[in-house]
Image (cartoon, rainbow, N blue to C red):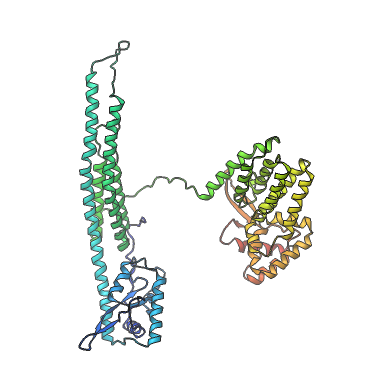
């Protein structure tokens, strides 16, 4: 539950629908809006009289905190026919008792109800008096029902608090008895050795009971505490459920509900502990927790009744433990693996380790997403591929050739190209010229046949586009790559954003007071390589985003406005001599 403030404003409550709206609803409906239900909105009795069999339900609640409440919906829309659905009396109640029914489903029901009317042309034209009756039974009784349900909820909270406190008091007797038995046993053993002193020092010798006896009594005490906690846990769980219902019904009381919940958990925690081991007399922790729970419950009840109530205490939460994300865990494992592989880069006599090589291939998926900044150089994709090649440097020719073939099939493209390049470098250093040539041929083939019309290729290799395109331009020439990118963009205009992201560079920002601390990464386009078609990309930016103006402004990596700012920088570069 959220920590709401005591002075929270009165919950919003929209006006009832108008008579005209209710007449419109019944003029376009014949049966209950719940699709499987065939109940008519009015029955005809034996005397031929029409008997009302329905009420109007809100799709999004009329009152704040109600089922499917939409805080962004204006009152006009809330009370309109589009947000209302005539239903039989049974189902109009059930959809509010089951607030998890999604808005989308209820809208589908409404659409089906109207479609049925259009097909059958059966409806229930109402007089103004009949429409007034519908409003009365639908919404006045709804308010009464909400008030009754709310009163019932707060009575349930008060009762649950009383049961919890009394149960905690009764359950405490069992660990009290276990603690007393332990203390009595220990006292008896110590008394039997009373007066025994150390002959060398004259100090009294303190004697403890045998470990077997101590362990038995300790187990009894622990079991008694666990039994007490087991008895109280369901009561606390039930109380929390009632408190959530109370907070939902009366959001302005959320702070008091939170106070009661916190006090109840203190009672549970206090019932699960004993002050000391070996045990001494009980302390006041449980009693204090029970007293606070009584106070919190009394304050909640008074506030609900509109009386003067004690304010909930200000809770100073302890510093939370750092949250370890999956990304952080993966990064930590990546660092550990690279460190484990570094011996292969320091000496050239270690044998090939296939498990280590495979692990480096797998962790390359982490490395490929690291931006190219100084801090990440020891961990980046090139470094990871280099270590993998060093691990493989003493593999025999057949195995090494297999590794080259497997590397050419790796994805994304940047992983395959970096692994092939580093295998080529190692083969060259070892004078294994045929293997060097095979790795080079595979690398050239990948660069020449890469599908740069694919959005995935640009996005999956975002931090490596400049390197990959630079290699491709070295193999061919700048004009060829410019033409390739221009043609790809013309064929696939949706490539614009990934192309702009791909041409950007990253610059790390450090704390001015502590240069060791990285505080962010800036993305920018300060220059474009000779193989990049600046004019063609700038032209496409102007066509798709005419509102973007040239600018030198920079932004943080992954900022919401990143593309717009990078595009503005590219436009600025185009206009700079």
Would residue 14 be found to the left or right of residue 196 on screen?
Answer: right
Q: Nearer the viewer, residue 232 or 519?
A: 232
Residue furthest to the front in view is: 398
Quadrant where the image shows the C terminus: bottom right
Answer yes or no: is residue 246 visible.
Answer: yes
Q: Nearer the viewer, residue 536 or 392?
A: 392
Task: Examine the rendered structure and indicate whether residue 354 appears above or below residue 455.
Answer: above
**Rendered location of residue 177, percent (x, y):** 21, 35
Q: Nearer the viewer, residue 155 or 77?
A: 155
Task: Examine the rendered structure and indicate whether residue 545 appears above or below residue 396.
Answer: below
Image point (68%, 42%), residue name: 392
Quadrant where the image shows the N terminus: bottom left
Image point (76%, 46%), residue name: 435
**Rendered location of residue 75, percent (x, y):** 37, 74
**Rendered location of residue 409, percent (x, y):** 67, 54
Answer yes or no: is residue 551 visible.
Answer: no
**Rendered location of residue 251, percent (x, y):** 32, 61
Image point (28%, 45%), residue name: 230
Task: Examine the rendered structure and indicate whether residue 387 appears above or below residue 309.
Answer: above
Task: Examine the rendered structure and indicate whether residue 76 appears above or below residue 148.
Answer: below
* Count of marks, rendered view: 0
């Amino acid at each position: 539950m959220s920590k709401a403030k005591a002075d929270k404003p009165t919950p919003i409550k929209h006006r009832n629908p108008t008579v005209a709206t209710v007449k419109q609803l019944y003029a376009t409906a014949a049966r209950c809006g719940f699709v499987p239900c065939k109940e008519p909105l009015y029955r005809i009795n034996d005397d031929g009289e029409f008997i009302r069999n329905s009420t109007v339900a809100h799709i999004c609640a009329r009152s704040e905190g109600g089922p499917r409440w939409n805080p962004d919906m204006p009152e006009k829309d809330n009370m309109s026919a589009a947000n209302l659905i005539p239903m039989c009396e049974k189902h109009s109640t059930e959809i509010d008792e089951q607030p998890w029914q999604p808005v989308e489903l209820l809208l589908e029901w409404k659409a089906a109800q109207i479609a049925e009317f259009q097909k059958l042309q059966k409806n229930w034209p109402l007089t103004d008096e009949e429409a007034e009756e519908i409003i009365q039974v639908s919404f006045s009784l709804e308010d009464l029902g909400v008030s009754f349900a709310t009163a019932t909820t707060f009575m349930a909270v008060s009762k649950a608090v009383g049961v919890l406190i009394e149960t905690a008091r009764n359950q405490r007797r069992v660990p009290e008895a276990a603690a007393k038995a332990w203390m009595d046993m220990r006292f008896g053993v110590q008394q039997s050795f009373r007066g025994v002193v150390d002959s060398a020092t004259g100090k009294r010798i303190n004697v403890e009971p045998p470990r077997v006896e101590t362990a038995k009594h300790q187990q009894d005490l622990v079991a008694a505490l666990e039994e007490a906690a087991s008895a109280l846990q369901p009561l606390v769980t039930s109380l929390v459920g009632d408190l959530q219902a109370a907070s939902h019904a009366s959001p302005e009381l959320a702070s008091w509900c939170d106070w009661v919940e916190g006090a109840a958990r203190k009672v549970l925690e206090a019932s699960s502990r004993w002050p000391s081991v070996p045990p001494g007399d009980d302390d006041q922790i449980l009693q204090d927790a029970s007293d606070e729970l009584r106070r919190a419950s009394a304050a909640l009840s008074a506030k609900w009744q509109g009386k003067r109530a004690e304010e909930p205490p200000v809770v100073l939460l302890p510093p939370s433990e750092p949250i370890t994300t999956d990304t952080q865990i993966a990064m930590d494992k990546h660092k550990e693996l690279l460190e484990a592989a570094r011996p292969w880069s320091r000496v050239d006599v270690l044998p090939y380790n296939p498990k280590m090589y495979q692990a480096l291939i797998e962790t390359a998926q982490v490395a490929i997403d690291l931006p190219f900044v100084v801090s990440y150089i020891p961990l980046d994709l090139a470094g990871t591929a280099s270590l993998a090649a060093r691990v493989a440097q003493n593999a025999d020719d057949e195995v090494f050739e297999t590794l080259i073939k497997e590397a050419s099939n790796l994805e994304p493209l940047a992983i395959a190209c970096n692994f092939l390049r580093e295998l080529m470098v190692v083969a060259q250093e070892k004078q294994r010229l045929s293997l060097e040539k095979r790795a080079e041929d595979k690398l050239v083939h990948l660069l020449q046949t890469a599908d740069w019309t694919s959005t995935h290729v640009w996005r999956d290799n975002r931090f490596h586009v400049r390197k990959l395109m630079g290699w491709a331009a070295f193999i061919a020439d700048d004009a060829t790559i410019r033409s390739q990118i221009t043609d790809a963009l013309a064929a696939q205009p949706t490539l614009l954003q990934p192309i702009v992201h791909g041409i950007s560079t990253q610059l790390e920002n450090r704390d001015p007071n502590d240069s060791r601390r990285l505080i962010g990464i800036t993305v920018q386009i300060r220059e474009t390589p000779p193989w990049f078609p600046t004019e063609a990309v700038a032209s496409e930016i102007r066509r798709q985003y005419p509102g973007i103006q040239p600018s030198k402004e920079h932004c943080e990596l992954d900022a919401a406005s990143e593309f717009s700012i990078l595009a503005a920088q590219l436009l600025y570069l185009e206009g700079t001599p």
